[in-house]
Amino acid sequence: MTIPPAVAAARALIADLITRGVRDVVLAPGSRSAPLAYALAESADAGRLTLHVRVDERDAGFLALGLAKGGDGAPVAVVTTSGTAVANLHPAVLEASHTGLPLILLTADRPHELRGTGASQTTDQVGIFGSAVRFAVDVPAPSAAADYDDGAQGLRDLRSVTARAVDAALGLRSGHPGPVHLNLAFRDPLTPSAPLPGPAAPAQEGHPKPDPPLVVPVVPQHLTSPALPGDPARTVVVAGDGAGPDARRLAEAQGWPLFAEPSSGSTGGPNAVAGYRLLLGSDELADGIEQVVVLGRPTLSRPVQRLLGRPAVAVTVVAPGAAPWPDAARNAAVVLPGLAAPWFEPTGEPPTSFLERWQAAGAAAAGVLDQATCDDAVLGGPTALSVARAVARVLGPADLLVVGSSNPVRDLELVLGLDGSGPEVLANRGLAGIDGTVSTSVGVALAAARRGLRTRALLGDLTFLHDVGGLLRGPDEPPVDLEIVVVNDDGGSIFATLEHGALAATGDGAGATFERVFGTPHGANLAQLCAGYGVDHQLVKDVPTLRHALQAPSHGVQVIEVRVPRADRLTESRALAAEVMAAATSIAP
């Protein structure tokens, strides 16, 4: 039986990626990518990988991103056909680039002789993702199936490309993982001439062991840190997105206050300061800070960025790998690839008055936030902040929470930890966009289930509507259990808390302008949308009912909608900040 060259090359490519650790592949349908589709279906049927199919390339890209985010570090591949399908991956590629997630983009293309001729679905795909990918190569169309037999030069060439691609995606040499792009040209015929014989690669038990990279990765040892430039007694640790547990370990070992974002992986513990972004509005507290040590990428808070930009504050950034270090304020005095082990060993010194002052202020802020979100305070109906607390309160170590950008992640920041350590939190903070969050949550849920974790998502209504197509799953797709809590305030309330909302409050027609171009009310019926996708929907009207719904067993994808007011968001935010600062500053130093 004669195997078309395109089919033989696709089978060899998928088989090689499996040996290098790829276990999940997301496929969006298309004709030019058919050789890859056949190879993937064959490998999935043999149990060598898990195949996920989505009809929208944007959703496919973010599903792959979620699988990588919620997984164990293995690379995830996504396959598209040519043309606009490739461009639709770009938002997910940018997010993966900024968060360092190992995506392998397999985009089918016309052969070189058809490019620039007006052929259908043909555009310049080479370099389409620019600097957002760690590695990109335009793979020529295969000309003979025999080139992919064992020992053939074509097979060796292909394996060389995939080795470099996986190495770059995982950051084995650079310490800077991220997406890579293989643009794969295929000539007709694109389909097997007969049922494909046998498996493309031996079935393997568990996680396939990747082939070694072409060059042995060099992992630099963490350097012993130079003397930090500020007064260690007046140092705080800022833990941004992806900081990991080292930020908390450092703060507790050195006796420093900890300002941890929800998706930092560093929340909780005796040094974590509740409501720190509100407390930074107090000059009495903020002026006492002489040094900040930054781990991860802080993105949520303007008060934190103002702190990092103060000329009198010595900023030390810990940024391993080759990625650009975070320093939006352009004020970093020292940038380190890591901290030596002694920094994480307890000093044995008693708590300083500086730490105790911040701990007391955090406790005062926690008391205000507790009163503002308790059941008695929301008898008139839930608020966005009380919804965030209800979600954080019922979820624990066996849960994983995906939180959307804009207000949900900022609300969660204020209440996470009020009722214990809470769940592990993931968020798309690379570019902090709202796009693709439903699909990301589905991918995270699929990956997290393998770790024995149950996944929930907390999203705003515009975030949900932006990616409502992510609810669409075919009947043959792997089952997923996911509860999505949608905080529906009929528009974009995040803008009310920014300068746009303050301008609108001045009147003179500014309110109408704000509502049209920033508030963007939509009036969408989420129940009917969910029904159209065959997804369960529940509208809850109070916080106790929400907690009950989250504690109940669930199967499949479910949407829990909570409607909250938007009109008074600016006034309520200002009042809460004032109350927190008053409570904190009333404590004797």
Image: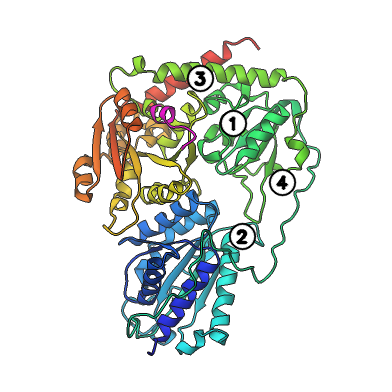
Q: Tell me the colour scheme of the image.
A: rainbow
Foreground: 471 or 476? 476
Mark 4 and mark 1 lie on one chain; the one further toward the N terminus is: 1
272 to 341, vertically: above or below: above
253 horizontally vs 204: left or right: right
Q: Which residue is mark 1?
A: 259
Q: Residue at x 44, y 63 (%)?
A: 49
Task: Say if residue 405 shows up in the picture.
Answer: no
Between circles 4 and 1, the one closer to the viewer is 4
Mark 3 and mark 1 lie on one chain; the one further toward the N terminus is: 1
Spatial CA span between label 3 and label 1: 14 Å
Foreground: 493 or 556? 556
385 to 376, vertically: above or below: below
Mark 3 and mark 4 lie on one chain; the one further toward the N terminus is: 4
> How packed is label 4: few (under 14 Cα within 10 Å), some, or many (20 or more)?
some
Q: Position of residue 321 (x, y in %)?
A: 66, 54
Q: Position of residue 587 (x, y in %)?
A: 59, 11
540 horizontally vs 160: left or right: left
Between circles 3 and 2, the one closer to the viewer is 2
307 to 337, vertically: above or below: above
Q: Which residue is mark 4?
A: 338
Q: Position of residue 546 (x, y in %)?
A: 31, 28
* Disc 1 element: strand
Q: Residue at x 61, y 20 (%)?
A: 359
Q: Which residue is mark 3?
A: 366
Q: Which residue is mark 2?
A: 171
* Disc 3 element: helix
Disc 2 marks which amino acid? Answer: Gly
* Disc 2 element: loop
Mark 4 and mark 2 lie on one chain; the one further toward the N terminus is: 2
Q: Which residues are magenta?
A: 390-398
